[in-house]
Amino acid sequence: MENKTIVVIGAGMCGVSTAIWLQRSGHCVILMDKGAPGMGASFGNAGLIAQWAVAPVTSPTLWRDAPRLLLDPNSPLFMQWAYFPKLLPWLTGFLSHANDAATRRIVTNLIPLLSDAVEQHRSLVRGTDLERWVSDSKLSYAYPSKAHFAADAYTWEMKKLAGFTPTVLTGPDVHDCEPILGPDIQCLAVLEGQGHITNPGQYIADLTKTFVRNGGTFVQAEVRDFQKTNGRITQIETDQGPFACDKAVITAGIWSKDLMKKLGLKVPLETERGYHVIFENPSEMPRNPMMMTTGKFGVNPMDMGLRCAGTVELGDHHAGPSKAPIALLKRHAKSVFPNLTYSGTQEWMGFRPSTPDSAPLIGELGASGIFTGFGHQHVGLTAGPKTGRLIAQLIDGKHPNIDMSPYAPERYTR
């Protein structure tokens, strides 16, 4: 096999996974990011390996629920109204998928990327000292009552298509399972055999160190342009000078939108701005990660404390954080964990890159030698290892054992 020099742009979960799988295939790889590895959305996510997260936000009830959610100060959905006119074309496309047929198509498309995600992470770290970062766990969806769980039947029908059927606990069994929970939670839907990461930012930083230790190169540089010869990539122009390459991979999350513009392509990618609060030195921790259905946030016991991460704020990826989503997370955490005390909090905001059809862009841009691996919405950490493996297979001329057409970038670049 001919050895190729490949530049991977973006050192989040998708980028570092791609770099490692390409390296294992014998390629000379340069991993590039304008910041430190893992410091984008990969740093601040909930840390859940969400192989069960196949049901999209665009459920058939979204048309009915969205106006109420936007007006309710206790809802996990926020809007930067000044950005709304720019968001409208993307939002129109997004809402067009809020029906049963489109939802089932999205679920079918996400299952191959997500349903074996824990094993994909294990394959990425197997035989290294990074195996410690991938933890076995259960995952519980927490509901105020069994009636609320029953009302969520459509979502669970979608998860069942991926093989995920919960054990439902009510009454005293809820507190026996998770003593940290207060009386506001009276029902748990528990999934066995799941996994989580106890420190996503450090996990990706350590993956990058392993990649470099094995002969890869990491360069902190900002991409300014792409140079092509006869329609194929030959060089990446950066603020640190030019880098010659045979192929390039764009895995820069929401910033991929700006990079695609440099290629003359307008990709409908917008950000679902997500937030987290870390409760430092907590007086108690959950036994396993949870998804709080009231407030729509994930809860994960992590090395640095108890992380509560979630909410959706539709807005500009160049704008700073808002106060309301953080306040909401703290308010909901106090409600579900009434006895929790802590020494302080850390707060964070990041950008989830979202496409109108809730599927990432994975594949080559024509015959340019430029490949994409971005647009994973809420599941970048989860699907990163599989995405990297798929891109490496495509670059090596191998045919992945899944249908790649739902993720083809051409669907947005024609």
Image (cartoon, helix red, strand yellow):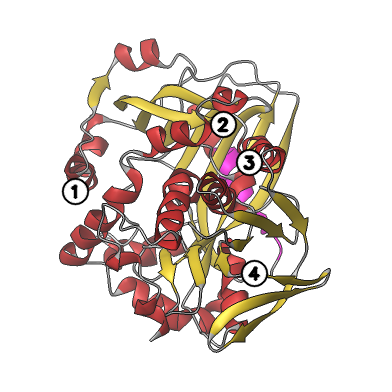
What is the distance, in whole Å, between disc 2 and disc 4 at their CAs? Answer: 52 Å
Q: Is residue 324 inside the magenta stretch?
A: yes
In the rendered picture of this protein, how many numbered marks are placed on residues? 4
Residue 204 bears which disc, if any? 3
Of labels 2 and 1, earlier in sequence is 1
Q: Residue at x 54, y 47 (%)?
A: 17
Kind of residue indicated by mark 2:
Lys
Q: Residues within 10 Å of mark 1 (few under 14, many from 20)?
A: some
Mark 2 highlights which residue?
334
Of labels 2 and 3, earlier in sequence is 3
Of labels 1 and 4, earlier in sequence is 1
Over which residues does the magenta segment extend? Answer: 320-331
Q: Residues within 10 Å of mark 2 (few under 14, many from 20)?
A: some
Residue 245 bears which disc, if any? 4
Question: Where residue 196 sits in the image (x, y, percent)?
Answer: 48, 30
What is the distance, in whole Å, between disc 3 and disc 4 at their CAs? Answer: 24 Å
Q: Residue at x 67, y 57 (%)?
A: 30
Name the front one of labels 3 and 4: 4
Q: Is residue 406 above or below residue 340?
A: below
Local secondary structure at mark 1: helix
Name the front one of labels 2 and 4: 4
Local secondary structure at mark 4: loop
Mark 1 highlights which residue?
154
Q: Is residue 268 left or right of residue 152?
A: right
Name the front one of labels 3 and 1: 3
- Name the one closer to the observer, 117 or 154: 117
What is the distance, in whole Å, between disc 3 and disc 1 at their CAs? Answer: 34 Å
